[in-house]
Image: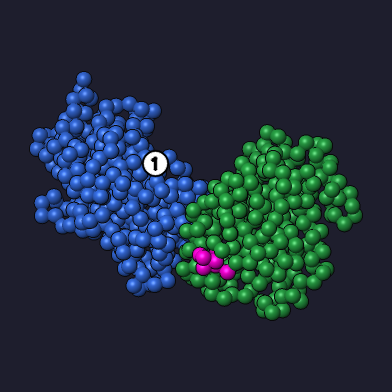
Amino acid sequence: MIFQSNGVKLENTRKAFGQALLDLARDGYDVVGIAADTSKSMCLDLLQDEFPKRVYEVGIAEQNMMMVAAGLASTGKIVFVTSYSAFLSMKCLEQLRTFIAYPRLNVKVVAGLGGFTAGIEGVTHMSLEDLGIIRCIPNICLINLADAQSTKKAIRAVADYDGPVYLRIGRDTSPVIFTDDYKFTIGKANILKDNGNDLAILATGFPVYQAIQAFDIIKQERIGAKLVEIHTIKPIDKDAILNLAKDTGALLVVQEHYRTGGLGSAVAEILVKNYPIPMEEIAVDDIFTESALPNELRMHYGLTVENICKAARKVISRKLK
Amino acid sequence: MSPKYVIQTSKYWGLLMIDINSKVISSLEKKSRQIRLETARICYQVGPERKAHPGPALSITDIIVALYYHVMEINPQKPNWSDRDRFILSKGHGCVSLYAVLADIGYFPKKELYTLRRLGSILQGHPCMGKTPGIDMTAGSLGNGLGAGVGMAIGAKLDNKNNTVFVLIGDGELNEGIVWEAAETASKYDLDNIVAIVDVNRFQSCGPCDVIMPSEDIKAKWCAFGWDAEQIDGHDMSQILYSINLAKYKKMGYPKVIIANTVKGKGISFMENNNSWHQRALTKDEWLIAKEELGENKNDIPK
């Protein structure tokens, strides 16, 4: 299910989305894509070239895009709105909450440039808070994807799901982690590797890649870990997380997001109320970041393989105290 | 297929005036009075703690009566009928009159009207689709209805349907920038199956529109955004019927807006042009005056 980390293939998640959407239309799904001057940058042109009437470009007007999506969804269409996660989670948040989530309309919000993938643009275009913001809203399914392969599978899965979804994807190419037999089930934790019960690493989004490398390193140190991808942050797979907590007694969360509100918060909420055990987290501190390449930012703000290994050792040592 | 008061309008706009005769107009005017009375009754019964919005509901009563009892092709027995005309009350706070109309034509029992703003009610403080049969779009946060209408109009075009989407917007609501984003979109996609109606009652929550944020020439603005704009008296039933029917049936390849000059609180003397009635409950004495003025005891008003 997972490629080895050496000799990785790189693929673009936005293109994977555009291709998956086109495939849905070809398969007879009643999909419509809407862009806010993002029809090219979010790869809706793939759909538009073959199905010109299935793509609408509303210009630089994200709030309006959400409302047009709400209206279209009310006529029975499966609507995909596309822009960047910083804008979709903040500029048009009210439209998403009040007019899509509240009436539970069938709109899929495809949020590109997630996490550090917008890095070079700076804080204005970066979203390290979107998962926390969206997680507060009832009725929305919140998904954070790790690579192009999972993006393809997830787009089909959310098209089959009736209701509002927010999916965070990336920008440029990123390592392809998963193989063709990757299975995506909304709301289900995805156990990628199992090498024992010293701890469980719960990773979401692009850092799943770093978590896999960390897993291989600590394996050399005879640390037995479970590596789990949590792609659905809401509704979160509470049963799986509690079972992992009970099996291992130590959890490590890895995410490209602030410590507040994201997967770390979601896991902590479950643990503290049901099964308090040591938990550590690799995430971004509560500060505004700056412009740089995604991998430079990951290094600078501590989302590294080395730090994941350190945190793994630390959470195990806390368990033993 | 149609509610009991609907007189099927001809698909040919040239024949419209034949349908709009004095009998039709007087029956709709009578209906307006009845809906105003029901609006006042709800705003009295809901009480001061849950106070509703009588002023903004009374300025739009004639327009929504014209829409629901004469113009729109709908079926209260099948609220989700896919070919129906759609109505979005973008100024969602005016919903008391709309609720009164929806109950009157059979979307839900009239007794529900007096549960407004109470726990467990199907009637929320502002319209909620899914909870209230007949509500085509959630509304209340101002500025957003037109964009939703644009989406519905695009959806209708995609499915080759002939229905029309009506969006009722307040004049204060024109402060919201998103209205103009949506107006541009309708124009870009040549949506001639959407009709916006602006309720120009000249007041918004905290005062006169001219003081809070002057709109200047509303008609010129809409025209600049590529819309065909027409100004009418929003309480003159024949003008309302003519302009709305024309907008629905004469499709010219561009969106249309009807700018309706109205009176906030219309029909109840002490509420007319008095903005303290934006959101307020009627006392018993006030209700008795309203009842007298709207003629509940007169024979021509159904109980």
Q: How far across and down, in percent of the image, does residue B10 sit?
A: 70, 76
Task: Pick the quarter of the image with the C terminus of chain A.
Answer: top left
What colour do you see for chain A? blue
- Along the line of sight, the residue nearer the viewer: A185 or B133: B133
A97 above or below A162? above
**Magenta stretch encompasses residue A170:** no
Please say whether residue B180 is visible from this viewpoint.
yes
Q: Label 1's element?
A: helix
Which residue is pictured at 34% across the width and 72% down the height? A49
- Along the line of sight, the residue nearer the viewer: A100 or A239: A100
Q: How far across and down, in percent of the image, does residue B224 sit?
A: 51, 65
For disc 1, the marked residue is A133
**Magenta stretch encompasses residue B223:** yes
Q: Residue furthest top?
A: A321
Which residue is pictured at 45% across the width and 53% down the height? A63
Which residue is pictured at 19% across the width and 43% down the height? A297
In screen coordinates, is B184 left or right of A198?
right
In screen coordinates, is B199 left or right of A199?
right
What colour do you see for chain B? green
- Along the line of sight, the residue nearer the viewer: B23 or A31: B23
Q: Amino acid at mark 1?
A: Ile
B182 above or below A197? below
Please, which chain is the residue tagged with disc 1 on? A
Which residue is pictured at 37% across the width and 32% down the height? A269
Please say whether residue A247 is visible from this viewpoint.
no
Q: Which residues are magenta?
A: B222-228
